[in-house]
Amino acid sequence: MIAAEPQMTGTPADTTPALSLQRLSRHFGATRALRDVSLDIAEGEFFTIVGPSGSGKTTLLRILAGLDRPTSGALLLRGQDVTLQPPNKRPTAMVFQSLALFDHRSVGQNVEFALKMRGVGAEARKTRALELLELVRLGADYYGRPVTQCSGGERQRVALARALASDPEILFFDEPLSALDYRLRKTLEVELRGLQRRTGRTFVYITHSLEEAMVMSDRIGIMKDGALVQVGTPSQIYDRPRDRFVARFMGEVNILEIRDGRLVELDTPLPGRADGYLVLRPEALSPTESGLPIRCTVLERFQLGSRVQLHLDTPAGLMIAEQPASCTLQAGDEATFSFDPDAAHRVSE
Amino acid sequence: MKKQLQALWLTVILVLLYVPILSVILASLANTRYMRFPHRNWSIGAYTDAFSQQETLVLHLVSLKVAALVTLLALVLATLGAMAFARYDWRGRSIYQKAVVLPIFFPQPVLGLALLLFFSALGITPSWKTAVFAHLVWILPIVTLVISIRLFGYDPAQEDAARDLGATRLQTLREVTLPHLAPGLISGGLFAFLLSWSNLPLSIFTTGADTTLPEWLFSRVATNYAPVVSAIAVIGTLASVLFGLVVLAALWMQRRAARQSSSASASISTA
């Protein structure tokens, strides 16, 4: 059974990283799918790799699981070099994007597969499988059911139970929730996070949805064109994106260029800030005159639950602002929005 | 009324399919060289002749050994070929895929002649072994198609998953890949066996001194007919029907065993 105690992350006694990626590169012919990725993932951490499709996330995860080998670089698992170790020798397990359930077998046979491969007897396998089905909130009556008769969410849970069966030290997830509907995804995100806390295992998760990453992760790594561009806690990355790519990836954002002490698009002086770009979150713009003012026309008004999103036609082009639902501005209204340029985060590229 | 028409239609089709076979059985029960009906004398003399001749056994053995070898080789090669098409993306894949299927479109006598010329150019004496090669040229594309349909319909990530869960390559093959391919392998194997077993045009050119069952039947019907020809044809047909029944029975028993074990485990879990 999985250890039920929560494990503290980053305790000084436990300094060997669960996984240490050392300059991993993977080339497919002329394509460089991974470029020099270096990263330490701590024991018990929930680490999420986020990036647009084609950024090399899946390639990276396949190398971590041993399903592919890097062209160069090394991978240490608890300090041991496992770069060339085949997947069946590694104490890790993966939940695949397609789930890859064995569809000619029953739920129970799927969950037991890893144990069967390890030569565990039929009785012990079954006991463990029933425990695991309980853990992922599927009842014992799912045991004999064919996986082809399970719904999307149930298949998800079967895949998770199957990966947990051998009690792996590290679990990998390759966008396992991407095919599910919004509500089910939200439920499973919370459950996954809870499971990770309860088991104290290291989870490495890939997604292209930043929202998913923010909800679950201890730390997030952002990938672009096969390289890790920024690693940090969700709030670090949200508040202090390293560049415009990360800022845009983190949600809707307004970006204004600073050149020679002026805001280029607004043609306004902005002394004391180096050249680069100002990152303005929609909530940083307010319809007051307390900061740097922008004259604009409201183009669209969208109701987002308790808040409204306004699309503004400004001298700098389309900008996006978010206000409480009490805001009375309607499409077509003239307005002045302003922001505090000193509080705004600046990136150099 | 509609139902009766339907029944009539089915009966007509069945009669048209089986009357020729039935007539061979009837012909085998005569004791005259001339096919004439009704017989003046009914006789099973043709069968006692057939069973007392060493030749009957030899003919069946040659055909059986060719068909069995063709089946085995076709299954191995077709599985590998289908894997190459379905799993890997390589240059010239689609051209190769079409080139492999091309022999099916050749009229078989032309293909047989071409192969005979090919063997003699290489200085190979034709025998039942060259016939195996000739049959493969024509049968392999068909079996490859049958198996690749099976391969295209399944997620290769299942093999990654098996490896990731601790299976060796061999275990992955046994536990995941083969069970998936099994229906394709069985139907491909049946195709291979029956197409080889009944092949005449390729065998005529490529068996050399050896004679397969269809070859012998053809030459005796053409030149030297006797009821024993019909009797051997009936025996050969029964042999392949028996083969088919054995395969079906094996499948049925396997399926029943699988159902029993899964329902047994289900009943344990509910208890």
Image: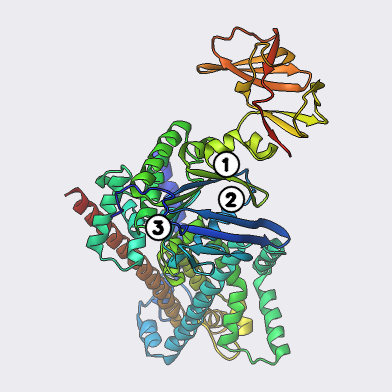
Comparing A154 with A322, the one in front is: A322
Residue located beneath label 3 in the image: A169
Which one is earlier in the sequence, the residue at label 2 or at label 1? 2
Residue A180 sits above or below residue A21 on the image: above
Q: CA distance from mark 2 to mark 3?
A: 21 Å
Q: Nearer the viewer, mark 3 or mark 1?
A: 3
Pick whichever, A332 or B192, lies toward us: A332
Q: Residue at x 68, y 69 (%)?
A: B106
Query: Do residues under tags 3 and 1 come within 8 Å of each other at their CB atoms?
Result: no
Residues at discs 2 and 1 in contact (Cβ within 8 Å): yes
Dot 2 corresponds to which residue?
Answer: A57
Q: Residue at x 37, y 82 (%)?
A: B47
Helix, strand or loop for disc 3: loop
Lower position in the chain sequence, tag 2 or tag 3: 2
Q: Does residue A293 sit above or below B2 in this rendering? A: above
* Label 3 environment density (alpha carbons within 10 Å; few <14, some 14–19, many ≥20): many
Task: For mark 3, name the chain.
Answer: A
* Residues marked 2 and 1, same chain: yes
Type of the residue with mark 1: His
Color style of the picture: rainbow
Residues at marks 3 and 1 on the same chain: yes
Amino acid on which disc 3 is placed: Glu
Q: Chain of mark 2?
A: A
Residue under label 1, please give it.
Answer: A208
Residue B19 visible? The answer is: no
Q: Label 1 marks which chain's residue? A: A
Please indicate whether residue A105 sits to the left or right of residue A212 in the image: left
Q: CA distance from mark 3 to mark 1?
A: 24 Å
Q: Amino acid at mark 2?
A: Lys
Local secondary structure at mark 2:
helix
Q: Nearer the viewer, residue B7 or B125?
A: B125
Check disc 2: other Cα within 10 Å, few if <14, some if 14-19, many if 20+: many
